[in-house]
Amino acid sequence: MKRLLGFVLVVCLLATSVQESNARKAKLNKNKLTLGNNVGYRLRVKHSRKKVKWKTSNKKIATVSKKGYVKTKKKGKVTITAKIGRKSLKCKVTVKAPSLKEKQITINRYEKHLLIVNYAKKVKWTSVNNDIATISQKGELRGIRQGDTIITAKADKYTLTCKVKVDNDPSEQGSYIHPNTVKVRSISTPLLHGKGYAQGGAIWGSEYFFVSSKADVIVYDFNQNEVTKHFVLDQSEEHEMHCNSVCFGRKYDENDPYPLLYVNAYNSKVSPEGTCFVYRLTETEDGLTSTLVSTIKIGFTDQKLWKEEGNPLAYGNFVVNRDLGKLYVYNLNDKHHVTRFFVFDEPTKNDDVDLNKEDLLLVKDLPYFPYIQDNCYKDGKIYIVSGGLYGTPPMLRIISINSMKQEKYLYLKDINLPYEPESIDIYNNKLYLRFNIRDKIQFYELSM
């Protein structure tokens, strides 16, 4: 009997020792918490199955349920205690009021910016003047026109404000082309794009050379209103065709039916060099064919031209001044938020050229033109179309070669063209913009 009592006593002592050991090892999943007002958080005790008693040091700041669920009430500091037997575990909780990350901000017209309220579950946004800037219920701020306004964020019982100043877009230099001075005519065509994505194009005579991302070329004649030719450009293993910028240069030979065709490309190697293929087009028994006669690279550009976290593959936008034999190249300079123009002499017809600093005739920084789609040249001016990226609507820009400044600009939405143009060129002294609309090709003729 004594042996049995002794055995039971040992077992009880061991059980008590294990429980006390578990209690000593027990800990909270969080020792410190920072929460917003009117939110909840579940505290848990690890390494213990014993009953836990929860307590708050200030019920006006935060309460705690029997299961450890913390509910914040108002701004302040409080301690939540979990008691396990004789052991107490504590979590210090800081309850913060909602706050705007930015209390004042300056944005450009059409620019978008996300406003953030810290420590708030639900926020109601309003703008004092929607004509200056609008705000979505997700906090997306958008500049509408130049001026000042106040954005209000209501979170719980708090009202927060942000002063907003809207400046004109820096690209809005020069005079604005009044929409009433522009005549727009749509042109329906039977044009079907070839293999790949519908990209750039260029006009020679009455023919439009449409180039797809797979270097498939379809020639459409405006006078005949039909497709007259179809061929594929020579490929280069070192480059990936992009073809968003296409233009004609000077003729390789006086007897050639067409001038040299310039088509931009990506580099297969991750490099910020702008690259352009130059093709000679000739007639054969099988129709029009192309021969790659030159590859032009802008070899001295560096990573400063591109966003560090972005894609360094260069679009390499090119345009040729056939009158003066000049080659204009431009890229976005994200570091300085400008568009950088380079001017060179047009290379000789059969050279593979790496253009270097020694070849530069001029470097000029212009306002930032995001997402340049295509360009063309005529009578001392470069006509640029840019797409709707970074909040800026699609635009037409006219650059003077003499001053290298933007002389005029037009928002395409103001002439009821709210789309992103894929190409631009000139025919019969009129601008021709090509759009990809719902898998269809649509031309618009602009007379100014």
Image (spheres, rainbow, N blue to C red):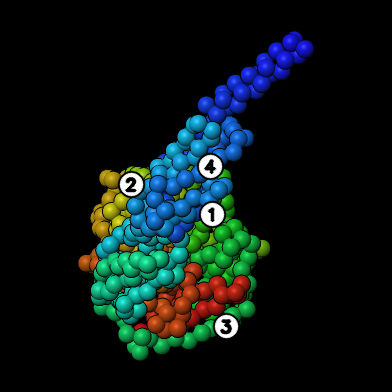
Q: Which residue is mark 1?
A: 241
Measured Cα–Cα span from mark 4 to mark 1: 69 Å
Which residue is depicted at the point 49% across and 31% down?
A: 87
Observer-nearest of 67 and 296: 67
Q: Position of residue 226 (x, y in %)?
A: 61, 79
Measured Cα–Cα span from mark 2 to mark 4: 60 Å
Q: Which residue is mark 2?
A: 304
Q: Position of residue 279 (x, y in %)?
A: 50, 57
Q: Secondary structure at mark 1?
A: strand
* Disc 2: CA contacts within 10 A as few (<14), some (14-19) or many (>=20): some
Point out the frontmost of discs 4 and 1.
4
Q: Is residue 401 left or right of residue 65?
A: left
Q: Does residue 411 show up?
A: yes
Point out the frontmost of discs 3 and 4.
4
- Furthest toward the top, the residue is 3
- The disc, 1 or 2, on the residue closer to the chain's N-terminal end is 1
Q: Position of residue 329 (x, y in %)?
A: 35, 57
**Where 75 falls versus 375 (above or below)?**
above
Q: Which mark is residue 53?
A: 4
Q: Which mark is residue 147?
A: none
Which residue is depicted at the point 53% across and 46% down?
A: 68
Q: Secondary structure at mark 3?
A: loop
Three-letter amino acid code of the residue under disc 4: Lys
- The disc, 3 or 4, on the residue closer to the chain's N-terminal end is 4
**Where 1 falls versus 319 (above or below)?**
above
- Furthest toward the right, the residue is 1
Q: Is residue 43 left or right of residue 426?
A: right
* Disc 4: CA contacts within 10 A as few (<14), some (14-19) or many (>=20): some
Q: Which mark is residue 188?
A: 3
Observer-nearest of 68 and 53: 53
